[in-house]
Amino acid sequence: MFYVGSYKHALDAKNRLFIPAKFREHLGNGFFITRKFEPCLSIYSSEEWEKYAEKIAALPDSVSEDIQDFIFSNTIYVEPDGNGRVVLSNDLIQYAGIDKNVVIVGAGKQIKIWAEDKWNQRESNRDYDHMKAVMAEYGL
């Protein structure tokens, strides 16, 4: 399963965020939300989270401690309510710079949650020539 598309939503006063039905139907009853090195959050299905977490756990101790602390300490497991909303922690909201408006983006095996202003900035700064060169290099 690859997640595609983007959706604009707003965080409500209780830090609840609506997850689009197209995404929820493949995520299952519960899923993981974590931070990335980019200023955004990522959603993983339980199956994909297990694969990702195992790769992190398999790193040599000499390099993994900071990475494990960074990823695992601010990961939450959520189950959407009857309206398809999940509650984001204050730490995750602050990390991603989310004020109110977000863009929820299908990104292959994961879903990313971006503050709308950060997403718009990212979109306007894309290096299309570089992306075309990489895709051509890999026969895409």
Image (cartoon, grey):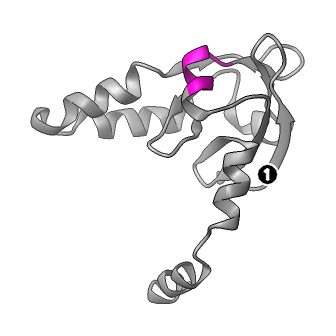
* Magenta residues (range): 88-94
Q: Measuring 20% from the left and 28% from the top, which residue is drawn there?
A: 65
- Count of residue discs: 1
Q: Is residue 49 left or right of residue 117?
A: left
Q: In which quadrant of the rendered view does residue 52 lie?
A: top left
Residue 64 visible in the picture: yes
Amino acid identity at mark 1: Ser
Relative to 49, say whether 8 is above or below. Answer: below
Nearer to the camera, 99 or 5: 99
Residue, disc 1: 6
Nearer to the camera, 31 or 114: 114
Q: Measuring 75% from the left and 16% from the top, which residue is drawn there?
A: 15
Residue 128 inside the magenta-drawn segment: no
- The majority secondary structure of the magenta stretch comes to helix
Relative to 112, say whether 95 is above or below. Answer: above
Residue ranking furthest to the top: 14
Mark 1, Cα crowd under 10 Å, few <14 / some 14-19 / many 20+, is some
Residue 91 inside the magenta-drawn segment: yes
Residue 44 visible in the picture: no
Percent coordinates x, y for residue 134 in the rendering? 48, 81
Q: In which quadrant of the rendered view does residue 21 lie?
A: top right
Q: If the image is split into quadrants, where does the C terminus sit?
A: bottom right
Percent coordinates x, y for residue 24 in the rendering? 77, 33
Percent coordinates x, y for residue 82 in the rendering? 87, 14
